[in-house]
Image (cartoon, rainbow, N blue to C red):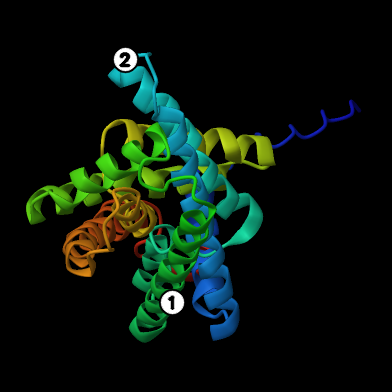
Amino acid sequence: MSTPPPPAPPLDAFSPAQIALLVESAGVRKAALPVLQTLMLGVLAGSFIAFGAMLFTVVITGSELGYGPTRLLGGLAFSMGLILVVVGGAELFTGNNLIVMAWADRRIGTLALLRNWTLVYVANFAGAAANVVLMHVTGLLAPGSGSSAATAAAIAAAKVELSFVEAFTRGVLCNVLVCLALWLSYAARRVSGKILAIALPVAAFIALGFEHSVANMYLIPMGMLAAGQDVDAVALVANLVPVTLGNVVGGAVLVALVYWVIYLRGKGEAVR
């Protein structure tokens, strides 16, 4: 009797159906985190995204590569922020829009979902604001300190001039790409794979000029200070409101709910 062949090794990547289960299970865990842990992880994420924004500002300053290549290079630099969130471990509001998969499957309640989003959003703001203060103290982006300061000021000015509809739609498209980056990162079994999965979608949203609420928590105040102005809270809120709403629609509806319908709707315990 011949010996049966050994089983084939698993594919390097998880399948989309497996990713859906992983994302849903992660959503359940995230919603159950204690308040202090959620807040601390949220502060880290806000700081990590701010580091990515800092690097983006420097990388695009003075570039002579042309508009498209410069934006792409800056986007790859900015992806460091999300890589730190995923690999280092942190709670990011835009990424946590994927928790909607667990909510749609009734594995968490509405209050648990909103609790996580509220705590993480506030903590992300605190982390980003802390980096604004620290960067301001360094003097590296002080008015007249160099071309990076001018770049930071120009970034902030462009963002606060967006109309509500422009900011909202750019927020939608941004978080589609951010949540797809996270979705793809769940497919990878290795850190290197997660980094590669994250880098291009994030670089794409930056290159295309889309709007990320947590990044703007750093970029707008920092740019105002770099321009020698006080932080205009009204202008900041006027940007964050439509961008945040757009991020929720892009991540929670166009990614999380769409994948839930495709892979988990009506499956119940059979898929777990």
User: Horizontally, is 93 left or right of 184 in the view?
Assistant: left
Q: What amino acid does circle 1 point to?
A: Asn
Q: Position of residue 195 (x, y in %)?
A: 59, 38
Query: Is 54 above or below relative to 232?
Result: above
**Total number of numbered labels?**
2
**Furthest residue toward top:** 65
Q: Nearer the viewer, residue 214 or 15?
A: 214
Q: Nearer the viewer, residue 177 or 109?
A: 177
| Residue at 27% over, 61% down | 248
| Residue at 23% over, 58% down | 249
Q: What amino acid does circle 2 point to?
A: Gly
Q: In the image, which is nearer the foreground, mark 2 or mark 1?
A: 2
| Residue at 20% over, 59% down | 239
Q: Position of residue 128 (x, y in %)?
A: 45, 62
Q: Position of residue 21 (x, y in %)?
A: 51, 58
Query: Can I make out residue 119 in this image?
Result: yes
Query: Can I make out residue 200 in this image?
Result: no
* Quarter of the image where the N terminus is located: top right
Dot 1: within a 10 Å radius of its alpha carbon, few (fewer than 14), some, or many (20 or more) residues?
Answer: many
Q: Position of residue 165 (x, y in %)?
A: 8, 52
| Residue at 49% over, 50% down | 139
Q: Which residue is mark 1?
A: 116
Residue 164 in which image quadrant: bottom left
Badge 1 element: helix
Give me the disc on residue 66: 2
Dot 2: within a 10 Å radius of its alpha carbon, few (fewer than 14), some, or many (20 or more) residues?
Answer: few
* Quarter of the image where the C terminus is located: bottom right
Q: CA distance from mark 2 to mark 1?
A: 41 Å
Query: Is 10 above or below relative to 86?
Result: above
Q: Nearer the viewer, residue 269 or 238?
A: 238
